[in-house]
Image (tube, rainbow, N blue to C red):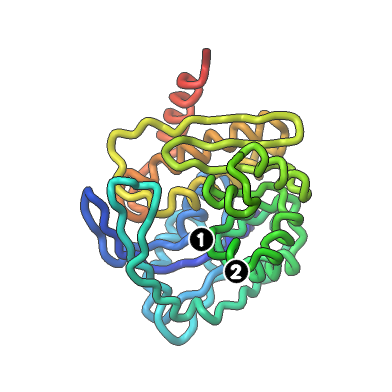
Amino acid sequence: MVDLVVLGSVGYDSIKTPFGSADNVLGGAATYASIAASFFAKPGVVAVVGEDFSGMDKFLSRNISTDGIKIVKGMTFRWSGYYEYDMNEARTVETQMNVFEGFSPALPESYKKAKSVFLGNIDPGLQLSVLKQMRPELVVADTMNYWIENRRDALFDVIKKSTIFLLNDGEARQLFSTTSLAAAGKKILSLGAKAAVIKKGEHGVLLFTDSSVFMLPGYPLENVVDPTGAGDSFGGALSGCLLKNGLSEQSLRKAVVYGSAVASFSVEDFGTSNLERITMSDIERRYREFEAMIRF
């Protein structure tokens, strides 16, 4: 039975970095997040794909439910882009919305009683529509600069309904017109979220709650191949970990570390390739390495 609903895009990416390229690899926020979450929970994806989609086996092999993936006439969402040596910023070459443009998420009955949901980077109106179809105990939501610029009011409604709200450092500054990440974190909490998580790419992550601040460095990788989907991998793993361990201060911090561990594996190869290869033992080993790095 599905215990974590994952909303977002499923599609194909064509990516070029200073270290290689890959064409038409499986991607999308819901793809990365659900695979990452599957180490900790039983995810079910809510997305839309076209008749050309051939990646269902990638989900099923991870015991991820595809009951919420709607197949419609047309072509699947596609994105192409590249990274320069600043691997924190993707540069878009082309986005083909295709069937994703008319997406209206409808949850299968088997999803509606799930205890948690990860609202991947998508129109906040669609995020809210999913929340109206279920009553989750845990809501983790993500966003991006486009929605901050164009759907600000709806995005604030999402924050108010979130247990945990995620965004990166640039988005946090943009959303609240501040240079201070601490101020941005506090403003998210003032809107009703129990925790604010601000991602800083290779420089780590900040966790804000009403009672504390937790800062985790980035994992010191020597081999960064493709950062696409790292934030989604982080969010999916964090959501699954919180579902498994609860929302105590200690559980929140552990979830940030596990999320960072999984995300660090994601960037070591193109697409979801490395996420598909690793095991829970690999994640636990990197978790312990994080523990050793921050102990003093």
Direction bottom: furthest residue:
73
Nearest the eye: 124 or 120? 124
Q: Is residue 235 left or right of residue 24?
A: right
* Quadrant in the picture for residue 198: top right
Can see residue 236?
no
Which residue occupies 46% across, 59% down? 31
Question: Between tags 2 and 1, which lies in front?
Answer: 2
Q: Is residue 109 left or right of residue 48?
A: right
* Quadrant in the picture for residue 157: bottom right
Q: Is residue 118 left or right of residue 64?
A: right
Quarter in which the N terminus is drawn: bottom right
In 3D space, how far apart are the residues under numbered discs 2 and 1 (Cα atoms)? 22 Å
Q: How many numbered circles are shown?
A: 2
Q: From the viewer's perspective, is residue 230 above or below residue 49?
A: above
What x and y, as percent, mark residue 208? 67, 36
Q: From the viewer's perspective, is residue 296 above or below residue 83?
A: above
Direction top: furthest residue:
296
**Tag 2, which secondary structure?**
helix
Q: Which mark is residue 150?
A: 2
Q: Earlier in the sequence, mark 2 or mark 1?
A: 1
Q: Which residue is mark 1?
A: 30
Nearest the eye: 119 or 150? 150
Give the amino acid at mark 1.
Answer: Ala
What x and y, as percent, mark residue 118? 61, 55
What x and y, as percent, mark residue 48? 51, 74
